[in-house]
Amino acid sequence: MTLSFNKRCYKLLKKVPRGKVTTYGAIAKALKTKAYRAVGNAMNKNPFPLKVPCHRVIKSNGEIGDFSLGIENKIRILKREGIKIKNRKVDISKYGHYFQNTQNL
DNA sequence: CCGTTGACTCTTT
DNA sequence: AAAAGAGCCAACG
């Protein structure tokens, strides 16, 4: 375990395919922790917001959440990736991504 | 080491 | 539906 907490977040995040989204809680769980908020912090400090798909991370209730470059921008990007957004919300049951084999990240 | 903060989440009003 | 409370944990000063 040499990677820092945020690096693990980014690495895991890169597994989310285009057109799909995940949640802070899902990432935390995949990392075997309950640090939902720490995940958010990691995203906030994300060095390259577009290189790492942090825009594909939303809240567990389907709301967009927040974004360092602005929520509107985040919504725009998601739409561009083919995700339909209804009234500031995403249908997770339709676009949600399930992580697998999160060991050894 | 302790207290605060935060792109969170779940439960209870 | 909307708000409030409690719980979680890494990072920072």
Image (cartoon, coloured by chain):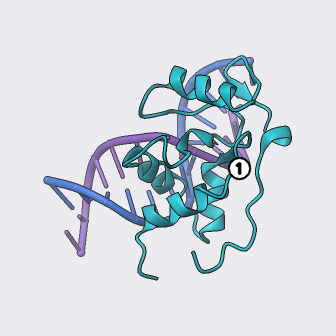
Chain colours: A cyan, B purple, C blue
The tally of labels here is: 1
Tell me where residue A102 sits by quadrant: bottom right
Q: Residue at x 65, y 64 (%)?
A: A29
Outermost residue, right direction?
A94
Q: Quadrant of the C terminus of chain A?
A: bottom right
Q: Which residue is mark 1?
A: A17
Residue A74 position, x and y percent, is 55, 29
Residue A76 position, x and y percent, is 60, 22
Tell me where residue A100 sits by quadrant: bottom right
Tell me where residue A13 sits by quadrant: bottom right
The reply, left or right, for residue A5 in relation to residue A98 is left
Image vertical order of residue A65 relative to residue B2, above or below: above
The reply, left or right, for residue A69 in relation to residue A29 is left
Q: Could you say which is closer to the camera, residue B5 or residue A79?
A: A79
Q: Residue at x 77, y 57 (%)?
A: A98
Image vertical order of residue A72 relative to residue B4, above or below: above
Q: Residue at x 73, y 39 (%)?
A: A19
Residue A85 position, x and y percent, is 73, 23
Chain at tag 1: A
Image vertical order of residue B4 relative to residue A82, above or below: below
Q: Residue at x 41, y 46 (%)?
A: A48
Q: Amino acid at mark 1?
A: Pro
Q: Crowdedness of circle 1 by 10 Å Cα count: few (<14), some, many (20+)?
A: few
Residue A66 position, x and y percent, is 51, 33
Q: Could you say which is closer to the camera, residue C2 or residue A83?
A: A83
Badge 1 element: loop
The reply, left or right, for residue A78 in relation to residue A96 is left
